[in-house]
Image (cartoon, grey):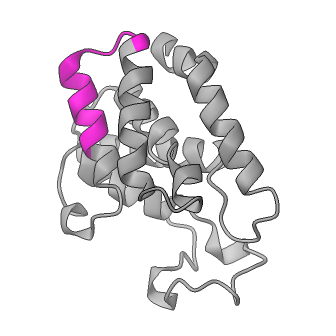
């Protein structure tokens, strides 16, 4: 997990993460915080093991830590967070010793984590799509009734 810890300690990662924290300090809905990132990573690990895909742990964790890192730009109407995360993620991943092939796989998963067409894929991006959606504890959310997610998308029960 050396490269994952490098991501967490990376100055740009910390700067971008703090911007999300500040933008979400009064948010009543799901937050894009470390709890969500780690829940998504750990659920991705479970899905990876269940599917016997052998995706390296650090690719799953890197994707989880970086998938919403552009969220604060979306709040400022600059771009969709899936797209605005890409240059940030590439920069951080290069600085944390990920190979070009790994960076491509991780950024593809980041770019597609909102794309339901890939949800059944047995790949990093398919697993991560499912993990990201499962990493929401709607069943215990205080804003459940105010949330504009359709009921069929809400996680009313624990699955992982």
Left or right of 14, for residue 80: left
Note whether 85 is above or below 119 in the view shown.
Answer: above
State the residue at coordinates (21%, 31%).
Answer: 104
Left or right of 115, for residue 35: right
Q: Quadrant of residue 115?
A: bottom left
Note whether 1 is above or below 48 in the view shown.
Answer: above
Query: Can the viewer see residue 50?
Result: no
Q: Quadrant of residue 131?
A: bottom left
Left or right of 77, for residue 122: left
Check residue 99 for magenta coloring: yes
Q: Quadrant of residue 86?
A: top left
State the residue at coordinates (61%, 36%).
Answer: 16
Residue 108 location (% of width, % of height): 24, 43
Magenta residues?
95-108
Note whether 156 is above or below 58 in the view shown.
Answer: below
Residue pushed farthest right? 26
Left or right of 53, for residue 78: right
State the residue at coordinates (50%, 66%).
Answer: 159
Residue 120 location (% of width, % of height): 20, 63
Q: How many marks?
A: 0
Main SS, magenta residues:
helix
State the residue at coordinates (57%, 17%).
Answer: 5
In the foreground, 131 or 30: 30
Check residue 154 for magenta coloring: no
In the foreground, 58 or 7: 7
Residue 82 location (% of width, % of height): 38, 52
In the foreground, 160 or 104: 104
């Amino acid at each position: 997990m050396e490269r994952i810890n490098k991501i967490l300690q990376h100055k740009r990662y910390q700067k971008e993460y703090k911007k999300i924290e500040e933008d979400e300090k009064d948010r009543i809905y799901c937050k894009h915080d470390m709890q969500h990132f780690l829940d998504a990573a750990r659920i991705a690990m479970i899905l990876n093991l269940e599917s016997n895909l052998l995706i390296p742990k650090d690719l799953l964790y890197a994707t989880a830590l970086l998938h919403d890192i552009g969220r604060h730009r979306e709040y400022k109407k600059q771009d969709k967070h899936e797209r605005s995360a890409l240059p940030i993620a590439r920069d951080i991943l290069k600085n944390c010793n990920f190979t070009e092939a790994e960076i491509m796989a991780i950024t593809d998963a980041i770019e597609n984590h909102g794309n339901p067409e890939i949800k059944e894929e047995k790949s990093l991006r398919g697993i991560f799509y499912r993990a990201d959606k499962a990493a929401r504890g709607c069943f215990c959310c205080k804003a459940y009734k105010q949330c504009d997610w359709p009921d069929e998308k809400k996680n009313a029960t624990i699955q992982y």
